[in-house]
Amino acid sequence: MTELIYKEESYKIIGACFEVYKEMGCGFLEPVYQECLEKELTLQGIPFDAQKIVALNYKGQKLDKVYKPDFFCYDKIIVEIKAVSTLNNEFRAQTINYLHATNMRLGLLINFGHFPKIEHERFVL
């Protein structure tokens, strides 16, 4: 059996997401969940950077375009949040691309728009 990477850290992050969902429910837009999760991560003492700018490269050349993952937690986990009825492959590809761009190993894709509970998926490189 394979050991989960960053098991403790990812459980804490997902627990914080469950807490936000328990408090707010489903039906808000993503920026509301973004702000609530920032507050919850702070309350739980989980270190994070929200929407930190990440530079992109193409064949060794820096691009003018950048991207901002929703959260970097513990300086090693990307957390991408959504507020949609269901996750699709476009969101999964986005999370995987963020991992490739940052050379991080773990990404969490969290959906607050699903009823009756959040959806969450782990991506490991």
Image (cartoon, grey):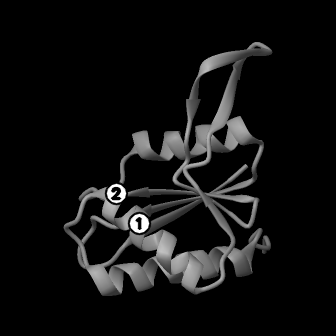
Residue shown at 36% from the left, 47% from the top: 88
- In front of the other: 18 or 35: 35
Q: In x, y percent, where is residue 98? A: 61, 41
Name the outermost residue toward the left. 27
Taking 88 as reference, is 65 left or right?
right
Q: In x, y percent, where is residue 51? A: 55, 50
Q: In this figure, which residue is indicated by the disc labeled 1? A: 35
- In front of the other: 73 or 103: 73
Residue shown at 36% from the left, 54% from the top: 87
Local SS, label 1: helix
| Residues marked 2 and 1 touching at CB (< 8 Å) | yes
Taking 85 as reference, is 14 left or right?
right
- In front of the other: 105 or 67: 67
Q: In this figure, which residue is indicated by the disc labeled 2? A: 31
**Residue 15: image tag:** none
Local SS, label 2: helix
Q: In x, y percent, where is residue 57? A: 71, 21
Taking 92 as reference, is 29 left or right?
left
Residue 9 showing in the rendered view:
yes
Q: In x, y percent, where is residue 46? A: 66, 77
Q: Amino acid at mark 1?
A: Glu
Q: Is the residue 44 above or below the residue 29 in the image?
A: below
Residue shown at 35% from the left, 79% from the top: 21
Q: Quadrant of the N terminus?
A: bottom right
Residue 111 showing in the rendered view:
no
